[in-house]
Image (cartoon, rainbow, N blue to C red):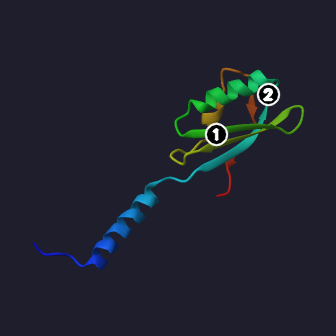
């Protein structure tokens, strides 16, 4: 059996690690504005609904005014989270309106 030089083995190991690192998706943040959030129960309902989407890690709702909240959703990067997915996830409460949506920092 032929032995390989140590430098070649290190090269193979480093190359394998580099490929594996690139396969891991980076976290992705999406944000938009939501109207119709009236109470803590509304916020909890939105968070529970969006939390059921595979790949969603963190959900934040921040009050911007009496009628408007900023919704931020952080995913594991394995999905593209569209406005229609968000609207569909919270559709059982017709008074929520997603007025804007987009990927942040791209």
Q: Are marks 2 and 1 in contact (CB under 8 Å)?
A: no
Residue on which disc 1 sits: 58
Residue at position x 62%, y 27% in the image: 49
**Disc 2 or 1, which lies upstream in sequence?**
2
State which quarter of the image contains the N terminus.
bottom left
Classify mark 1: helix, strand or loop: strand
Classify mark 2: helix, strand or loop: loop
Q: Is residue 100 above or below residue 106?
A: above
Q: From this viewpoint, is residue 95 visible?
A: no
| Classed neighbour count for the residue bearing mark 2: other residues with Cα under 10 Å, few (<14), some (14–19), many (≥20) | many
| Classed neighbour count for the residue bearing mark 1: other residues with Cα under 10 Å, few (<14), some (14–19), many (≥20) | some
Q: From this viewpoint, is residue 40 visible?
A: yes
Residue at position x 24%, y 79% in the image: 5
Residue at position x 82%, y 24% in the image: 38
Residue on which disc 2 sits: 37
Residue 21 is marked as none
CA distance separating discs 2 and 1: 18 Å
Q: Position of residue 30 (x, y in %)?
A: 66, 46
Residue at position x 90%, y 32% in the image: 66
Horizontal side, residue 69 vs residue 66: left or right: left
Between residues 20 and 10, which one lies in front from this camera angle?
Answer: 10
Residue 97: name its quadrant.
Answer: top right
């Amino acid at each position: 059996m032929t032995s390989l030089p140590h430098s070649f083995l290190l090269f193979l190991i480093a190359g394998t690690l580099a490929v594996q690192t690139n396969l891991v998706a980076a976290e992705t943040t999406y944000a938009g504005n939501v109207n119709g959030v009236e109470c803590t129960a509304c916020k909890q309902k939105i968070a529970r609904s969006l939390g059921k989407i595979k790949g969603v890690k963190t959900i934040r709702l921040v009050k911007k005014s009496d009628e408007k909240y900023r919704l931020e959703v952080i995913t594991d990067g394995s999905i593209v989270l569209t406005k229609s997915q968000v609207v569909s996830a919270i559709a059982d409460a017709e008074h929520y309106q997603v007025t804007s949506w987009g990927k942040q920092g791209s």
